[in-house]
Amino acid sequence: MAEEPLVGRRLSLRPLAAGDSAALLEAVRASRETLRRRFSWAAAEPAADEAQAFIAAAAQAAGRGESRVWGVFETKD
């Protein structure tokens, strides 16, 4: 079942898509110091293939109805 994004004036909330791997990687890298305090997976430098694999696994889990992983994005005009 396709999920409809939630779109506001400034932000959008939608399921992660394959094309989001660069943005996900950038967000993790930018927040790494904060993430490391709470998440052991953030200790290592993230790699592009890991971001792609995470998004693919999230899509598969969503397809099975097990979980949903959404991202917050700036709304484009």
Image (cartoon, helix red, strand yellow):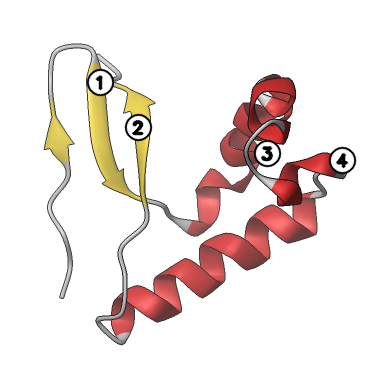
Q: Residue 6, image x and y in percent?
A: 13, 37
Disc 4 packing (10 Å; few <14; some 14–19; many ≥20): few
Q: Amino acid at mark 2?
A: Val
- Chain-order first, disc 2 or disc 1: 1
Residue 75 rendering spot, x and y as whole percentages: 27, 20
**Which label sits on residue 45?**
4
Q: Would residue 27 be found to the left or right of residue 70 on screen?
A: right
Q: Cα distance, mark 3 to mark 2?
A: 14 Å
Q: CA–CA distance between discs 4 and 3?
A: 10 Å
What is the spatial separation of the Cα atoms under label 2 and label 4, in whole angstroms? Answer: 22 Å
Residue 65 coordinates in the image, percent (x, y):
24, 81
Q: Residue at x 87, y 45 (%)?
A: 44
Q: Looking at the image, which residue is at 46% across and 68% down?
A: 58
The secondary structure type at the circle numbered 2 is strand
Q: Residue at x 65, y 44 (%)?
A: 39
Q: Which residue is mark 3?
A: 25
In this figure, which residue is indicated by the disc labeled 2?
A: 72
Q: Is residue 11 left or right of residue 31?
A: left
The amino acid at mark 3 is Leu
**Nearest to viewer (mark 2 / mark 4):** 4
Badge 1 marks a residue whose secondary structure is strand
The tag earlier along the polypeptide, 2 or 4, is 4
Label 4 sits on what residue type?
Glu
